[in-house]
């Protein structure tokens, strides 16, 4: 049972991340778009909710507004990815 617990603790899936975003107040279409972009940018492992909150903090916007930006603004994803890469190099 321990290996399954460890796997679940360290891995996520698109459906889990969409569920998190739904509980944060995003629509299913917004959740799907955010998770899709996160997968393409190879950031899904950071957690979709965490990505939205991080971008909200970066921009100073409320998290729902920041998440809506992430649905449509591909440059926002570049900025977000760069922020994580800078954080990893420290």
Image (cartoon, rainbow, N blue to C red):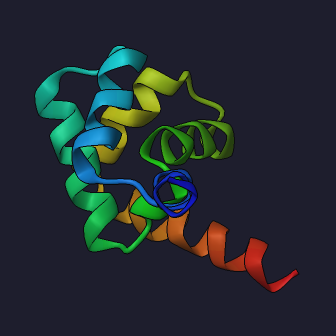
* Left or right, 67 with reference to 57: left
Residue lying at the far front in this picture: please name it. 1
Residue lying at the far left in this picture: please name it. 29
Give the x, y percent position of residue 58: 66, 46
- Image quarter for residue 41? bottom left
Residue positioned 39% across, 54% down in the render? 12
Q: How many labels sit on residues?
A: 0
> Looking at the image, which is closer to me, 67 or 25?
25
> Looking at the image, which is closer to me, 1 or 39?
1
Residue positioned 62% across, 45% down in the render? 54
In the image, is residue 27 above or below residue 75? Answer: above
Residue positioned 37% across, 16% down in the render? 23
Residue lying at the far right in this picture: please name it. 90
In the image, is residue 80 above or below residue 40? Answer: above
In the image, is residue 22 above or below residue 34? Answer: above
Give the x, y percent position of residue 51: 51, 48
């Amino acid at each position: 049972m321990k290996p399954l617990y460890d796997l679940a603790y360290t891995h996520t899936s698109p459906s889990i991340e969409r569920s998190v975003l739904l509980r944060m107040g995003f629509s299913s279409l917004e959740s799907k778009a955010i998770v899709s972009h996160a997968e393409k940018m190879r950031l899904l492992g950071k957690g979709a909710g965490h990505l939205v909150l991080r971008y909200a903090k970066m921009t100073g916007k409320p998290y729902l507004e920041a998440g809506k930006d992430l649905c449509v603004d591909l440059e926002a994803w570049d900025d977000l990815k760069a922020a994580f890469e800078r954080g990893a190099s420290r």
